[in-house]
Amino acid sequence: MKKEDKKKIIKKIADTVKEYENFYLTDIATLDAAKTSKLRRECFEQDIKLMVVKNTLMRKALESLDENYEELYPLLKGNTAVMFSNIPNAPAKLIDKYNKSKKIPAFKGAYVQESFFIGDKYLKELVSIKSKTELIGEIIALLQSPAKNVISALQSSGNTLHGILKALSEK
């Protein structure tokens, strides 16, 4: 491969890392063509970009960026596929779904919400991370619940008071 071609690929990888907030490093080498195609289809449906990269090109792309990704460099061995997503837990859920059957794709590590997660032990934590929209939804529900409780209490106590006053007036 020519140097110019390598530079273009490195720039493309670096641009993709900048474009997405989170990325996961996995190993999909043992998947056959049909399973790889199925994984790519599921990634597309969940707005996850799957990219198979050469380790040296990935490392050079990460080195060209402003942030420090040194913790991920030891993971760039063997076959590496990168799952890019703006939803922090989407790739983790997909990897976990596949792992329940045969440990493929193998989870190497991830860069999620400006933190590094290295090794299989963090996969369950990554699955449970909530996305920004999920957190906003929970906050809105929490803010609405006291208002709903007050309105409900006023309506029920109003009926109770009305019933008491009616009973007293009839006597």
Image (cartoon, rainbow, N blue to C red):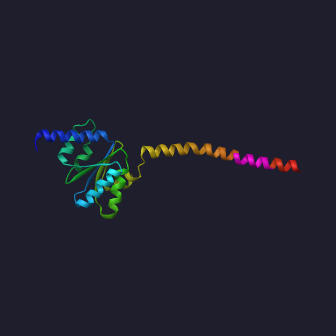
The count of marks equals: 0
Image-based side of 87 in relation to 8, left or right: right
Residue, x 35% and y 53% (percent of image)? 92
Residue, x 73% and y 47% (percent of image)? 157
Residue, x 62% and y 45% (percent of image)? 148
Residue ranking furthest to the top: 66
Location of residue 70 (image quadrant): top left
Which part of the image, by quadrant, shows the N terminus? top left
* Closer to the camera in the image, 7 or 122: 7
Q: Position of residue 126 (x, y in %)?
A: 37, 51
Image-based side of 146 in relation to 73, left or right: right
Q: Position of residue 128 (x, y in %)?
A: 41, 52
Residue, x 25% and y 37% (percent of image)? 65
Residue ranking furthest to the left: 2
* Closer to the camera in the image, 81 or 112: 81
* Closer to the camera in the image, 108 or 6: 6
Q: Position of residue 51 (x, y in %)?
A: 25, 49
Residue ranking furthest to the bottom: 101
Q: Is residue 133 magenta?
A: no
Q: Is residue 159 magenta?
A: yes
Q: Is residue 146 above or below residue 128?
A: above
Q: Position of residue 57 (x, y in %)?
A: 18, 44
Considering the whole magenta stretch, tell me its main secondary structure: helix
Q: Which residues are magenta?
A: 155-163
